[in-house]
Amino acid sequence: MLAVESLTKTFSLDDSDLCAVDHLSFQVSPGEVFGLLGANGAGKTTTLRMILGLLEPDEGYAEVDGVRTADDPIGVKARLGFVSASDGVYPWLSVREMLMYFADLYAVDPNVAADRCESLAKLMGIEPLLERRAGTLSTGQRQRVTLVRGLIHDPPVMLLDEPTRGLDVVGVQTIFEYIEHLRDVGKAVIVCTHRLDEAERLCDRFGLLHRGQIRHMGTLDQLRASTGQQHLVDMFVELMRGV
Ligand SMILES: Nc1ncnc2c1ncn2[C@@H]1O[C@H](COP(=O)(O)OP(=O)(O)OP(=O)(O)O)[C@@H](O)[C@H]1O
């Protein structure tokens, strides 16, 4: 499970301060898909960077499976899987070599890693690509490989940043199936996306982020009741107009 408690980050600009994330609190349970949604600049990436331990919060903390990022940054990284649309691959390694390399970085036993590599490759339909040089993959193939890579150390919590960006309909469907799988195997999942239509279909619960604060949080039904709007896109339009 993932807990974020009063997480806060202010950046100093030349002539002013910018509070990018403002006392943010939420929790994601095992088997739950939480959509952290917001317009450009709302604070999503800054939040993910603090959860991952890449950026130090000014206040508050993130706790992954009972471990706080500030107390044990390496332990937290071992418990997190991260997939981003901008993930790169090592072009000169084969897909299998790259997956095994990442498993090794996470200190996964080589036999366990080899089995996991096979079963995840089957799950994501990349078995025929395992011996291919990663640099020769298409965008959609590369995305499947990075999805497998994110799970190679079997983390309890997965962070997905714009997972469908740049993918065709088949690629998007693959992401949907991947997220279904994560839910089925009890991962706690955060999805950040601008695709509100996809988020409505994918996520169990939502946090609508605006200027660093969660303005609405709940299931779609709860958000409909509290905002009076049917769809996330209308909820956001109202939020943006309100400020
Ligand atoms: N290193 C930094 N220094 C100064 N300001 C920053 C820094 N990183 C982010 N910001 C500012 O913090 C705010 C939140 O940025 P963040 O990248 O978290 O937003 P986001 O929700 O991920 O946006 P997008 O959807 O456009 O990726 C923005 O106003 C951004 O300009």
Image (tube, helix red, strand yellow):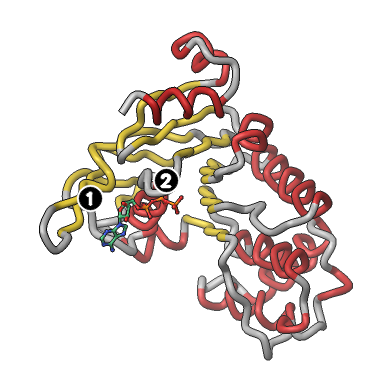
Front position in the image: 110 or 60: 60
The C terminus: image quadrant? top left
Q: Position of residue 77 (x, y in %)?
A: 42, 62
Residue at 57% from the left image edge and 14% from the top image edge: 221
Amino acid of disc 2: Asp
Please tell me in which quadrant of the rendered image residue 138 appears: bottom right
Discs 2/1, front: 1
| Nearer to the camera, 85 or 182 | 85
Among the two numbered marks 2 and 1 on one chain, the one whose residue lies closer to the N terminus: 1
Measure how far apart labels 2 and 1 are at the Cα level.
22 Å
Q: Residue furthest left?
A: 15
Q: Depth check: 241 or 108 in front?
A: 241
| Left or right position of 195 against 132 | left
Asked whether mark 1 lies closer than 8 Å to ligand 1, one says yes
Residue annotated with mark 1: 9
Using the image as rendered, state which of residue 201 and residue 105 is in the foreground. Answer: 201
Q: Is residue 30 left or right of residue 44?
A: right
Q: Residues within 10 Å of mark 1 (few under 14, many from 20)?
A: many
Identify the residue position indicated by label 2 in the image: 65
Q: Is mark 2 within 8 Å of ligand 1?
A: no
Position of residue 21 measured from the top left corner of the image (x, y, whole percent): 28, 44
Q: Position of residue 104 (x, y in %)?
A: 56, 78
Tag 1: residue type?
Lys
